Image: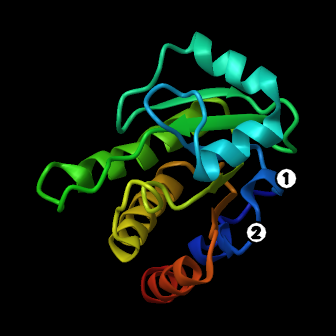
Amino acid sequence: MPKKEPVPMNQRVRLVFEDITTLKVDAIVNAANNLLIGGGGVDGAIQRAAGPELLAACRLLGGCATGEAKITKGYNLPAPYVIHTVGPIWRGGDQGEPELLARCYRNCFKLAKKYRLISLAFPAISTGAYGYPKAAAADIAIQETKKALKANPKLELVIFCCYDAANRAICEKAFRERI
């Protein structure tokens, strides 16, 4: 069997302006709260789209600490898995927020590798109700993605799903400069 050439990083990362709950990937990432019980934003949208089984599964996980990640089935979603991670609340940047956000991505990528996932979609973790500055969050997401793709050649596709035009413009600029 011929050896497969590695796919360049810029072909393994995609930016989309779509509803994350409709993506056909191995797992979508949920920007969850510590209790994993749903809420507003992307968390509420994922919980509604997945159906009540997702909430029941999340209740069995016993919550999730900020910066950590846990995985469940996707239930009624096109994605077979949901990786739940809890991003930091922005408090000015001197309360460990950058490291906590980076840990969110690292822990999601660790679960992706453990479960042998080849495609993964992220929302803009912590940039909604948690108030993390969008450009700073995009920089961290890209840095951690580049590291993860180097460490896991089996991960074929990482999608960043933008939820509004402002986030899309910031992400497009960060991607052009860093990917």
- At label 1, counting other C-alpha atoms closer than 10 Å, the crowd grade (few under 14, some 14-19, many 20 or more) is some
Q: Position of residue 33 (x, y in %)?
A: 47, 36
The answer to whether the residues at label 2 and label 1 have Cβ atoms under 8 Å apart is no
- Residue nearest the viewer, comparing 170 with 139: 170
- Residue for point 60% across, 77% down: 10
56 w.r.t. 134: above or below: above
Q: Amino acid at mark 2?
A: Glu
Q: Position of residue 39 (x, y in %)?
A: 58, 40
List the residue tagged with mark 2: 18
- Residue for point 58% across, 27% down: 37
List the residue tagged with mark 1: 24
Q: Position of residue 129 (x, y in %)?
A: 44, 56
65 w.r.t. 57: above or below: below
Q: Nearer the viewer, mark 2 or mark 1?
A: 2
Q: Is residue 135 left or right of residue 39?
A: left
Q: Quadrant of residue 65?
A: top left
Q: Amino acid at mark 1?
A: Lys
- At label 2, counting other C-alpha atoms closer than 10 Å, the crowd grade (few under 14, some 14-19, many 20 or more) is few
- Residue for point 69% across, 24% down: 55
Q: Is residue 139 left or right of residue 173?
A: left
Secondary element at image label 1? loop
Q: How much space separates mark 2 and mark 1, taking CA atoms? A: 12 Å
Secondary element at image label 2? loop
- Residue nearest the viewer, comparing 113 with 48: 48
175 w.r.t. 80: above or below: below
In the rendered structure, which disc, 2 or 1, sits on the residue that comes first in sequence?
Answer: 2
162 w.r.t. 89: above or below: below
